[in-house]
Image (cartoon, rainbow, N blue to C red):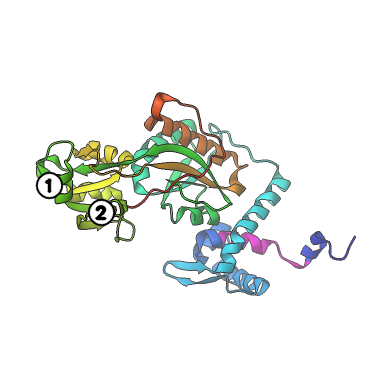
Amino acid sequence: MAADDPVTDLRGYDLNLLVVLAVLLRERNVTRTAEQLHMSQAAVSAALGRLRKLFGDPLFVRAPGGMAPTARARSLQGPVRQGLDSLKVAIAGEPEFDPARDAAVFRLGMSDDLEALLLPELIARVTAASPGSSVFCLQANRMTVADLLDSGGAQVGVAASAAWGPDIRSRTLFESGYACLYDPVAVGSPDPLTRAAYLALPHVMISADGTRGVVDDVLDAENLTRRRVASTAHFAMAPLLLAGTASVATMPRHAAEVLGARFGLQVCEPPITLPRFTVSALWHRSSSGDPRVRWLVETLGELARTLMPPPGGTDSPAPWDGAPSMNGDPV
């Protein structure tokens, strides 16, 4: 056998270090990594020291709440995860998942507008079909969900689609647009809002960074502005800010309808032309063979067709490897 054979070249490496690296990349915290691997913190720290020497890079630097991966560590996420997944299949065989018999912890990343629409019914469906399973939802948006999937922090993400990298697979769930939400008693305005009333009202903006949203982009194109009286990063806060105040929020229609019905607020079509966008289920390509991921994505697809039926009433499922589509934006 040739001296440079890639298999024999691995003899000088401790492959257990890659397991530690994979969990560190997911947890980004030594204490949680030690708990996950049933190791002492000292053992994890020692393994990290060996990994740093192996790759000639710090791999992680201190950050609020834990550690942040360096560029080199981020570049290792995909290859390490795929390599360990392939090794696991080689040893244990292809994984199986029987929802009625098996227990799984499903970890999803999505923003709270999508949680409001999907999560209650998703939990009901998962626990009915797979009584031993649970659903944990992590806060994510279209800017952060890919990193969550890369690190293994979530198995599936749901987001308004963007230009995902080559390692992210997607399946279209539904199309949505925007709607206005307001307290009809406090506003004292008929449904729908007129353009003049909409522009005159103070606006509650939902934005992760509190700067601007798609409404501002549309108004700028017409040389118009709105008065933003408040901003929140969470859609669920909008009803609390709108109740009893003469103000309006513009948000994805799927969230506006859920929150409007729950809090007795009025939902109407925006009196300006706003874009539509596609919401997709996302997963890492290394998870494509995982039957738990496949089952969860299929369940999300069935749920989305029930809650957000497509125009024309067709209920044909989207393909497993759906194509990425357009962005959704802050409002």
Residue 145 lies left or right of residue 59; in this view the side is: left
Residue 331 lies left or right of residue 75; in this view the side is: left
Could you tell me which secondary element the residue under label 2 belongs to?
A: strand
- Coordinates of residue 272 in the picture (x, y in percent): 25, 44
Question: Is 144 one of the magenta-colored residues?
Answer: no
For mark 2, what is the residue? Answer: 205
For mark 1, what is the residue? Answer: 244
In the picture as drawn, the residue positioned furthest to the top comes out as 313
| Mark 1 nearby-residue class (10 Å; few <14, some 14–19, many ≥20) | some
Residue 50 lies left or right of residue 300; in this view the side is: right
Q: Amino acid at mark 1?
A: Gly
Report which quarter residue 64 is drawn in.
bottom left
Residue 189 lies left or right of residue 146; in this view the side is: left
Could you tell me which secondary element the residue under label 1 belongs to?
A: loop
Q: From which residue to which does the magenta span run?
A: 12-23
| Mark 2 nearby-residue class (10 Å; few <14, some 14–19, many ≥20) | many
Q: Residue sitting at 49 percent across and 55 percent down?
A: 148
Question: Is 13 one of the magenta-colored residues?
Answer: yes
Q: Residue sitting at 70 percent across and 42 percent down?
A: 93
Tell me if I can see residue 201 in this picture. Answer: no
Report which quarter residue 18 is drawn in.
bottom right
Q: Amino acid at mark 2?
A: Met
Quick one: label 2 or label 1, which is nearer the N terminus? 2
- Coordinates of residue 91 in the picture (x, y in percent): 72, 47
